[in-house]
Amino acid sequence: MKRLITLFFVILIAGCAMAQKNYDFSAECESGQTLYYEITSSAKPYTVEVVSELNNRLKHYNTYPTGNIIIPQYVTYNGEKYSVTRIGIGAFGGCSGLTSITIPNSVTIIGDRAFSGCTGLTSIIIPESVTSIKNDAFAECSGLSSISIPNSVTSIGSTVFNNTAWYNTQPDGILILDGWCVGYKGVEPTGSLTIQEGIKGIANRAFIECSQLTSISIPNTTKIIGEETFYNCSKLTSISIPNSVTSIGERAFSRCNGLISVTIPKSVTNIGEWAFGNVLNVIYDGNAKGRPWGARTVNGIIDDGFVFSDSKKQILSHILATKPTLQFLIQ
């Protein structure tokens, strides 16, 4: 009986260990370390992302990689050549012994917490292939002082560089890095705020829940307003979106209950889901397609969950009879 119980626990422990596996296959890289990969496309073109060894947020590896890591552009598995296009969620999180990382030109996305807590990293070169850097990708990399964001990047998550050596040497206020407003440091802003000229994008959640912010000036160089950028800025009453902006992220102005009306320029071609949740009225004469924006009215007409399509003449809703002052003529 004792042997049966022992065997049961051995099988149980082995099963738990197997359940922690986080990858489809592994391979040794040029720098000698074993990297782990998850297949993201099993049809041509074959693609993979780099992932951690274990599916456990507290422990990513049995033995954490150290030193210099060179991620390959391609890796072969079962006779097929896979392109490495992503660095996955938490792929190198907590690898404090990692001193340098080479990211290939095939990578387009750096995932959430991909390098968070890599305290031994002092510099990072992000290749021109990368278009998106997700939340907390380099957060808590306390030795990271040299960072360069390429022009190819069109989306930056929240608190990507918080508590890096670079972050810790920045003065309080708006944080600017390579033409991106990546956040705000120190006591939250109050009253009016002006973002400096030359900014091309505002990162996700950059000013989230800045409850004392009443107005903000965005420069006419800005193209991207990220997700939840001004979410729940409840006292925000004035916002001017310049005609340089092409994309407004999900919930960017949601719960800004002080906003009576927001005019969106025709230059905007992408508007995320609930970007204007609870905003009283949105004025727009462009061609953005997408999910419901959440505004109570669009051009003075009840949005009612409607997905704005090719033309304002296609709005499928009814006139807000109870608030005639908000009824705007649609020519």
Image (spheres, grey):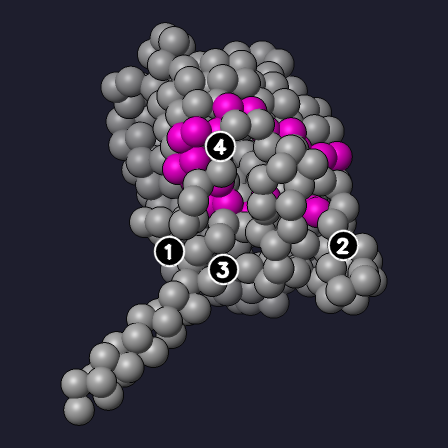
Give the distance between the C-alpha atoms of the residues marked 4 and 1, in whole angstroms.
19 Å
Mark with earlier residue (4, 3): 3
Q: Is the residue under label 3 in contact with that under label 1 (CB below 8 Å)? A: yes
Type of the residue with mark 3: Asn
Q: Position of residue 95 (x, y in %)?
A: 43, 35
Mark with earlier residue (2, 4): 4
Which residues, given as a range, are shown in magenta? 84-105
Give the distance between the C-alpha atoms of the residues marked 2 and 4, in whole angstroms.
23 Å
Asked if residue 92 can be seen in this view, the reply is yes
Asked if residue 297 can be seen in this view, the reply is no
- Determine which residue is flagged by label 3: 22
Secondary element type, mark 3: loop
Q: Residue at x 38, y 21 (%)?
A: 142
Q: Residue at x 61, y 54 (%)?
A: 26
Q: Is residue 324 left or right of residue 187?
A: right
Q: Position of residue 25 (x, y in %)?
A: 62, 59
Q: Which mark is residue 66?
A: 4
Task: Compare residues 197 and 263 and report the one nearer the observer.
Answer: 197
